[in-house]
Amino acid sequence: MSTYMAKKETVERRWFVIDAANKPLGRTAAAAATILRGKHRPEFTPHVDCGEFVIIINADKAILTGKKLDQKFYRRHSGYIGGLKEESYKHLMATRPELAMRLAVKGMLPHNTIGDKSITRLKVYSGAEHKHAAQQPIAVD
C-alpha cells in the first residue's frame, strides 16, 4: 500500500467562517491558518496547496491579552533612511482591525509560494456580516 499524495487539481475547497468576537486574536489567527493550509484534512500533503477558504467575522471584537494593546506595535519600513513607520495595536485595532487579523494569519503561514496562494483565500470583515452566504460556509468553533 502506498502513501496517498493529494494533487492540486483534485482538491475540493470548502468555505469556513470563524467568529472572532471575544476571542484572542492569536488563537483565531492560528485556527484560520490551519484551515488555510489544509492541515485539518486527512489527505494533507505538505508540498501541495490543499487548503480551504476562510471567512473571519467580527475582527473588531477580537481581544489582545495582557499589555499587548499598549506595548505591541505594527512596524513597516520603506527601505529609505528614516523610513520606519510605527502604529500601536490600540490604534490599529480601532481603525483597521481587518489588517491586524490579516497580518497575524499571514505570519502563521509558510513564507513561500504556498503561503502566498493561501493568504488570498482569507476574507476578513470587521462586522458580523459577510457577502459569501452563497458559498454556504461551515461555522468553526
Image: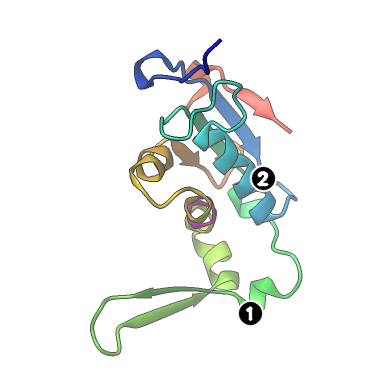
Residue 36 image offset from top left, x and y in percent: 51, 36
Give the position of the N terminus as an image quadrant.
top right
Q: Residues within 10 Å of mark 1 (few under 14, many from 20)?
A: few
Q: Is residue 9 above or below residue 128?
A: above
**Residue bounds of the magenta highlight:** 101-105
* Residue of label 1: 71
Q: Residues within 10 Å of mark 2 (few under 14, many from 20)?
A: many
Total of numbered circles in the picture? 2
Give the position of the C terminus as an image quadrant.
top right
Task: Residue at 54% x, 27% y: name it.
Answer: 44
Which numbered dot is residue 54? none
Q: Is residue 64 above or below residue 115?
A: below
Which numbered dot is residue 20? 2
Residues 83 and 61: in front is: 83
Task: Residue at 67% x, 26% y: name it.
Answer: 139
Residue at the extreme front of the image, as rendered: 1
Residue 35 image offset from top left, x and y in percent: 57, 34
Task: Residue at 48% x, 57% y: name it.
Answer: 103
Q: Is residue 79 left or right of residue 1?
A: left
Residues 32 and 114: in front is: 114
Task: Residue at 41% x, 44% y: name it.
Answer: 115
Check residue 83 for magenta coloring.
no
Q: Is residue 28 left or right of residue 121?
A: right
Overall secondary structure of the magenta stretch?
Answer: helix
- Amino acid bearing label 2: Ala
